[in-house]
Amino acid sequence: MSTKGMSGDRNARLAWTLVLVVGSMLGLAYAAVPLYDMFCRATGFGGTPQIAPEGERPILSRTVKVRFDSNVDANLPWRFTPLEREVKVKLGEEKLVHYRVTNVSQRPIVGTSTYNVTPEHAGPWFNKLQCFCFTEQLLLPGQSVDMPVVFFVDPEMDKDRRYDNVRTITLSYTFFEAKTERAKTLLGSVPADATGKGG
């Protein structure tokens, strides 16, 4: 085989290798956001609260204040507020609170929320049993809904002296408009007379 032919084979192999490397990098970049989200939810990293199963746990006398924060993306025409600004809970005690959300637009919208707690190092101890943030929410034009959150602060936190100074935890949500396939399915199920467009 000529030198020219061998050089062409090497160039073709190099080109295919580069295509594979670039394709792999694009695939990893696309998967990075959902993988990071799953990691945060599993570990409490970045102040992400844990999703806890039902079960028995001790209730301690030590209390913390839990404050509630609400935010809405600028492109989402919803009002979103906690019905209580803060509550005091004992470690291990289950607590039910509500947020109220209102669609102030003339069209049905599906929203989804992200959440975290501050201080961030309290994330692994903050557990949610029930939350509107677990699923996408459909609101019709002008509709208001009171959405529940059931949570507790893990009593195991009391055993770690590094968390003795945690007296207040802030639970924060931000709503965005959902653009997923499930959101399209929810919007497709809305009767024509409820879309705000008229008949």
Image (cartoon, rainbow, N blue to C red):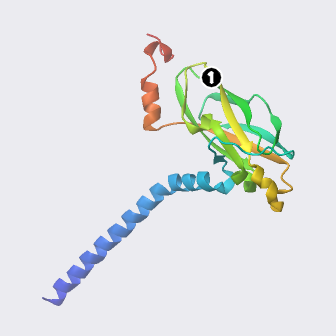
The x and y percentages for residue 21 are: 38, 69
The x and y percentages for residue 32 are: 50, 57
Q: Could you tell whether 85 is left or right of 192 in the image?
A: right
Above or below, 178 relative to 106: below
Query: Crowding near pointer 1: few (<14 within 10 Å), some, many (20+)?
Result: some
Q: Could you tell whether 51 is left or right of 87 in the image?
A: left
Above or below, 176 relative to 147: below
Amino acid type of the residue tagged 1 in the rendering: Val
Above or below, 17 relative to 3: above
Residue at the spot 22% in from the left edge and 84% down from the top edge: 7
Residue at the spot 77% in from the left edge and 45% down from the top edge: 58
The x and y percentages for residue 195 are: 49, 18
Q: Secondary structure at mark 1?
A: loop
Q: Nearer the viewer, residue 151 or 100?
A: 151
Residue 73, visible in the rendered structure = no
Residue at the spot 80% in from the left edge and 34% down from the top edge: 85
Q: Could you tell whether 22 is left or right of 121 in the image?
A: left
Residue, disc 1: 104
Label tally: 1
